[in-house]
Image (tube, rainbow, N blue to C red):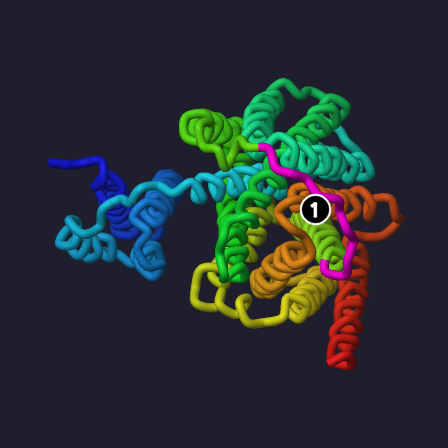
Amino acid sequence: MMTKKKIPIRLLRIFGLIDGVSLLILVLIAMPLKYFFAIPEAVSIVGRIHGGIFIGYFLAIVIAQLMIRWRIYWSLLCLLVAFIPFGNFVLDAKLKKREGELLAKPFPTIWLVYSMIFFSFIDLFSQLPIMSTYAQSLGASLTWIGIIVGMYSFANTGGNLLAGMLTDKWGAFRVLVLGLVGTTVLLVSYHFVDSPYTLLVVRFLHGFIGGFIVPAAFTFVANEKNEKKGSQTALTGAFVGIAAIIGPATSGIIAARSTPTNVFLLVAALGGLLFITAILKLRQQEAWSKKLETASFVWNRHLFYAFLGAFLLMFSQGALSYLLPLRVNMLGHDSSLSGMLLSVFGMVAVLFFLLPTKRIFDSMSPLRSFQIGIFLLAISQMGLGMIDVVSIYFIVLACYGTGFAFIFPSINLLLIQGTTPKNRGKAYGIFYAFFSLGVVMGSSGLGIFPLSIPQMFIVTGFLLLTGCLLGGVRLAEKRKAA
């Protein structure tokens, strides 16, 4: 008899077997029909079905990881066997023997917070490969495309600042609920957009309300008692990275097969589910609803480098979201390839965050990590501007993902070191305002200058190198003082 505690492992086993069967049909039936009997439609049809099943299987792996909380190598093994014929069946036999041990554990509140962070960033990342071309399909010029892409983050800046102040005054629950329900409604409203001007208005409202979620959620995570803050912030970054993997690839495929508005409806469904869960699970918890005694905000060097890193990281990300789809289209490929490329950096970052490499951030100076991360982002941007071979872009985006993995925990640690729980909400509001401002300048700001797309990539790289040098100056000062 199946109990609730066995649901995650049973769900994983069922999707694993279905995925294994679809892979065998693809390899043993569809591919011979294409190559020996000249029926290419077989691979096209079966491949799409197998792709949809694989997404379901991947989500089942994520659910198992979150609820069973087994060692991460089990999830990686589940992912690996999906690419090996008969691999799913061998793994299923192993899981069946251990099914009695692989029971779901009580779902901690902190994981619900991580889910909200995941939602906020998958909302952002799912837009990356499609927004430029979507605006273009509505008749927007190159300059207007940059403005439309950047409008979300421009409005996000105001939402972040307001959310930071409200989180310290109201507590996280009210701010999160308002952000979740507002974002869900606005995602649905994309379905009614019919011109670049309507799209601009929806992007503004979407960005402003969406800016409520992240400062409140990150403030709660930062205020949790945990001696290993480096590993904790790395785990938070893992959810950002997972969103970066799933969001661009899925949205690129869905947009290529149907319409971009279907991408927004899918993300809206997740937002609605989290809104209901938050109402049911968090409403009565004092830690979420209590008001905090606020303290005055004091600027210091930790905050300076945290805010600088937030700006540079998202300037780079804004440039990437604006330029990469256009660069890929220029080289003769569609948005699905843009989504795959953007997912590569997320996969690399997640591996850094989830594997034992995350312990680096408990021992390494956050300023050193900051410097390494910015340097890797810089050379990646320059590579995208100077290289015309798309296959090499996968290596470049892997380098970009490594840089992201170094800088994200470092800037969060710098912010935590420069604040107290009494003013951390306001600090995170400003922090994510710099995130949003960086995206605006990296998309709309670059679009103003009369530069070619490769030249814009190179200019972005030089700006990041300047930030890397600033971090190096501070490290030299610390050594001298020591």
**What residue sits 53% from the left and 59% below the top?**
229
326 lies above or below 351? above
Secondary structure under the numbered disc 1 in the rendered image: helix
**What residue sits 78% from the left and 63% below the top?**
467
Q: Which residue is more in the foreground, 122 or 477? A: 477
Residue 296 visible, this orientation? yes
Residue 211 visible, this orientation? no
Span shown in magenta: 291-302
The C terminus sits in image quarter: bottom right
Q: Which residue is more in the foreground, 220 or 125? A: 220
Where residue 59 sits, quadrant-wise, is top left
Q: Which residue is more in the foreground, 38 or 383? A: 383
Q: Is residue 299 magenta?
A: yes
Question: Residue 85 location in percent, x, y?
Answer: 26, 56
SS majority, magenta? loop
Amino acid type indicated by mark 1: Ala
357 lies above or below 113? below
Residue furthest to the right in view is 450
Question: Residue 125 location in percent, x, y?
Answer: 59, 43
Question: Residue 48 location in percent, x, y?
Answer: 40, 40
Q: Is residue 99 left or right of residue 362?
A: left
331 lies above or below 296? below
Residue furthest to the top in view is 192
Q: Which residue is more in the foreground, 270 or 321? A: 270
Q: Is residue 373 left or right of residue 217?
A: right
**What residue sits 42% from the left and 29% below the top?**
277
Q: Is residue 235 magenta?
A: no
171 lies above or below 377? above
**What residue sits 59% from the left and 33% below the top?**
291
Q: Which residue is mark 1?
A: 427
The N terminus sits in image quarter: top left
Residue furthest to the front in view is 293
